[in-house]
Amino acid sequence: MDLRALRYFIEVVRQNGFTRAAEALHVTQPTISKMVKALEDEFGGQLLLREGRGVQLTDAGQVVYDRGLEILEQAQLLRSQVAEVDNITRGDLSVGIMPTAGHYMAPVIALFQQRYPGVNLQVNEQGARAQYQLIQEGKLDMALGLFSEPDPALERYTVARQKTRVVLPASRVTDPEEPMHWRDLRDLPFVLYTSDFALHEHVLQQCEAAGFTPQVKLQTRYWDFIGHLVAANVGVGVMFEHVIARYDPQRVASRPLVGPEITWDVALMWRPGYLSRAAQAWLDCVREVYPQPLVGAAVPEFQN
């Protein structure tokens, strides 16, 4: 059904005539007549009776008029809701954030919710590998991930750059800037993140490249628990600089890892192609908070 024909028909009834309806709608009378005739043909019967200069609804016409008012009202509501989405006054946005990287996104969340309070922001907390998979499957709009090399399958915007360091009990570190090679970890027990974290796979790969399989004593999803385990001498950890900065330096210390030394990008990632208005707004907020990537253990200083 042509909504324009329905609108013309209703206006004819409201104005009680074709001429007055044409004037109100700023179209010609033949146009109004043609559209009403098309509507009658669609419903298979007469909807209006001409009486002098006025019109009279048939029984079928009364039904079309009553329901037509509801249909046009719903159509207007639909247009308004779509316009609201385009203006980002409502909608949904799903964002993935790594548990160790929430401090990077906290100021972004604050800025986004201040500007777009009607958008329902859903946050998914999982490790970087799991976030990557969810983005690939289209289950998240955007996510904060970790990259040690380019990935042509995804678009990304870097918010920070990090290096990995080996974490040891403070009593075992005399010079925190003295590098350790991966091969130096051969005989040491490890405490690692679980396999949904990118750093888990990274440690296994680097140990293999150095010619050994790590002795994994325990795996956990929690960075603070790894710190406690290291302090208790259960094993060594491999962590990013921004996480190490949160540990108690009286209990836990670290040294650079080299051979190789790898720099990681902490980056917002999304699939190439269309971005919803809400997702584009989120990206704009991220760019505003992070015009340049942070380095090492630096924390965001953005003031909303």
Image (cartoon, rainbow, N blue to C red):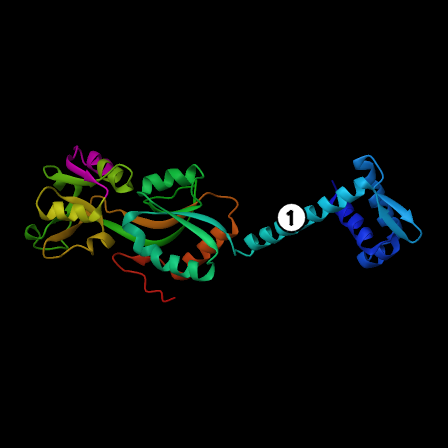
Residue 219 on the magenta span? yes
Residue 91, horizontal then vertical, whole percent: 50, 50
Please tell me which residue lies in front, 7 or 138.
Answer: 7
Residue depicted at x 30% and y 56%:
103
Residue 168 visible at all: yes
Q: Name the residue under label 1.
A: 74
Q: Is residue 60 left or right of residue 233?
A: right
Residue depicted at x 79% and y 36%:
43
Residue flagged by tag 1: what amino acid is it?
Gln
Q: In this view, does 177 lie to the left or right of 1?
A: left
Residue depicted at x 78% and y 46%:
5
Quadrant position of residue 34: top right
Quadrant assignment for the N terminus: top right
Residues drawn in magenta: 205-221
Q: In this view, does 277 lie to the left or right of 72?
A: left
Residue 21 on the magenta span? no
Quadrant assignment for the C terminus: bottom left
Residue 291 visible at all: no
Asked if residue 85 is positioned above or below residue 42 in the image, the reply reads: below
Please tell me which residue lies in front, 71 or 233.
Answer: 71
Please tell me which residue lies in front, 215 or 122.
Answer: 122
- Extreme residue toward the front, this view: 59
Residue 112, horizontal then vertical, whole percent: 43, 58
Residue depicted at x 82% and y 56%:
15
- Extreme residue toward the right, this view: 52
Residue 301, horizontal then vertical, whole percent: 32, 65
Q: Look at the numbered disc 1 and give the secondary structure of its residue.
A: helix
- Extreme residue toward the left, this view: 171
Residue 224, horizontal then vertical, whole percent: 19, 49
